[in-house]
Image (spheres, rainbow, N blue to C red):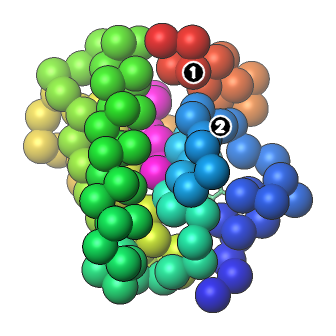
């Protein structure tokens, strides 16, 4: 089902991209829980992550691993936490979130308010890592 993420894939709306190949895309979450909070998506329009075909599902996690390794080089943190929620945007995605404690990955928490310039700077650093 087309969603805001399809528009990001097509470049119809802006995003702060971190990594991309023919099948997958990683970009910064616009309302991050932490600096470096990234979304990793397949380019296929599938809503529910567990409805992805087996190879897309496995390759999505493999792509997410490569992205997580870049994030942790740039954002000081204990580790990169992962979460799959999917209640807001009906396009499969993995959240990658730099965390130091379990409370850092609480989605009920108030989100950071980062300017476009700050997001662009973070994305550029992670991209270059
Ligand atoms: P969920 O579907 O519950 O996993 O949440 C969707 C996530 O997508 C939220 O963390 C939003 O902040 C994020 N999001 C929604 N629209 C955009 C956008 N245009 N660019 C980047 N992130 C977005």
Answer yes or no: is residue 118 visible.
no
Q: Could you say whether the residue bearing mark 1 is in a helix, strand or loop?
A: helix
Work out whether residue 32 or residue 8 is closer to the camera in this orientation and state it: 8
Give how far across and how far down residue 83 sits, in percent.
27, 57
Residue at the front extreme of this rendering: 55
Residue at the left extreme of this rendering: 102
Q: Earlier in the sequence, mark 2 or mark 1?
A: 2
Give how far across and how far down residue 69 sits, in percent.
32, 24
Q: Which mark is residue 23?
A: none
Left or right of 36 on screen, residue 1: right
Residue at the right extreme of this rendering: 12
- The residue indicated by pointer 1 is 127
- Dot 2: within a 10 Å radius of its alpha carbon, few (fewer than 14), some, or many (20 or more) residues? many
Q: Could you say whether the residue bearing mark 2 is in a helix, strand or loop?
A: strand
Give how far across and how far down residue 100 sits, in percent.
17, 28
Left or right of 20 on screen, residue 80: left
- Dot 1: within a 10 Å radius of its alpha carbon, few (fewer than 14), some, or many (20 or more) residues? some
**What residue appears at the point 51 percent right and 80 percent down from the top-left corner?**
46
Q: CA distance from mark 2 to mark 1?
A: 8 Å
Q: Is residue 10 above or below residue 22?
A: below
**What residue appears at the point 34 percent right and 66 percent down from the top-left corner?**
55
Q: Is residue 72 above or below residue 4?
A: above
Q: Quadrant of the N terminus?
A: bottom right
- Give the residues drawn in magenta, as a range: 33-40
Give how far across and how far down residue 49 sits, in percent.
36, 75
Give the prevailing secondary structure in the magenta stretch.
loop
- Ligand 1, by image quadrant, is bottom right
Answer yes or no: is residue 84 visible.
yes
- The residue indicated by pointer 2 is 17
């Amino acid at each position: 089902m087309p969603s805001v993420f399809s528009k990001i894939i097509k470049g119809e709306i802006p995003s702060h991209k971190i990594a991309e190949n023919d099948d997958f895309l990683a970009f910064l979450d616009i309302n991050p829980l932490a600096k470096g909070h990234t979304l990793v998506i397949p380019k296929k329009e599938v809503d529910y992550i567990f409805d992805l075909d087996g190879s897309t599902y496995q390759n999505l996690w493999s792509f997410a691993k490569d992205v997580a390794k870049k994030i942790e080089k740039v954002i000081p943190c204990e580790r990169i936490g992962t979460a799959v929620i999917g209640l807001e945007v009906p396009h499969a995605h993995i959240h990658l979130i730099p965390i130091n404690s379990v409370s850092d990955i609480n989605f009920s928490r108030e989100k950071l308010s980062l300017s476009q310039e700050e997001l662009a700077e973070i994305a550029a650093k992670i991209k270059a890592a």
